[in-house]
């Protein structure tokens, strides 16, 4: 099973093996989202605010770390890499995914990387020794319409254990 995934904007690569505009530095948690979620109780006119009490989260098999890389040639490669957040439930994944910039909206030279927690997104990490990368090239016309869908599908396959 793969242990990491990266997708990038135009001119960059998408790689799997264990992210240029700023993105949210602290992703909202599912609790943040729940306080703003309205749930239909009896009729469309009567809505109550769901406060999150008694809700069960759905754990993933692994804890994941989302990284962002912004290529600044004046800085060391490692200094361009930033941990955005970690998540370990389905609900936290969707809260994060809903609040970060779409992959198609990243500037050239910026990447997102998703790794299992504890594995750093660099070849120097010994757990990446036998890793690799898949490169997906899209025509400019397909870039926006397909990149976001492909990125989401790959994320879901990865965190769901389908890869």
Image: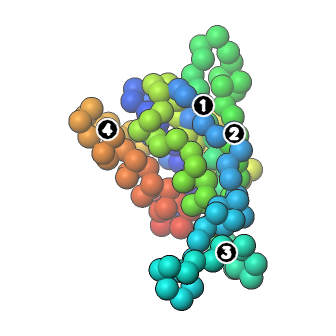
Q: Is residue 6 left or right of residue 75?
A: left
Q: Position of residue 129 (x, y in %)?
A: 62, 42
Which mark identifies residue 143?
4
> Quadrant where the N terminus lies?
bottom right
Measured along the vertical axis of the image, is residue 112 above or below residue 85? above
Residue 140 percent location from the top left of the image: 27, 32
CB under 8 Å between discs 1 and 2:
yes
Q: Name the spot of residue 82 as percent of width and height, x first.
A: 69, 34
Residue linked to disc 1: 22
Name the residue beneath numbered marker 2. Answer: 25
* x 69%, y 39%: residue: 25
Question: Could you tell me which residue is drawn at 67 percent across and 49 percent down?
Answer: 27
> CA gap, disc 1 to disc 4?
20 Å
At horizontal 54% and vertical 54% (from top left) the residue drawn is 98
The disc placed on residue 50 is 3
> How many tags in the picture?
4
């Amino acid at each position: 099973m793969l242990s990491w995934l990266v997708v990038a904007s135009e001119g960059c690569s998408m790689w799997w093996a264990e992210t240029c505009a700023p993105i949210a530095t602290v992703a909202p948690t599912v609790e943040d989202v729940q306080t703003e979620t309205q749930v239909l109780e009896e009729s469309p006119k009567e809505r109550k605010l769901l406060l999150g009490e008694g809700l069960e989260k759905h754990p993933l098999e692994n804890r994941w770390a989302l990284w962002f890389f912004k290529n600044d040639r004046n800085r060391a490669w490692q200094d361009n890499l930033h941990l955005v957040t970690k998540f370990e439930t389905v609900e936290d994944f969707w809260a994060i995914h809903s609040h970060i910039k779409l992959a198609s909206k990243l500037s050239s030279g910026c990447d997102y990387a998703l790794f299992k927690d504890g594995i750093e997104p660099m070849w120097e990490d010994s757990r990446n020794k036998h890793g690799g990368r898949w490169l997906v090239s899209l025509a400019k016309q397909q870039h926006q319409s397909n990149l976001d869908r492909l990125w989401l599908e790959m994320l879901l396959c990865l965190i769901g254990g389908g890869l």
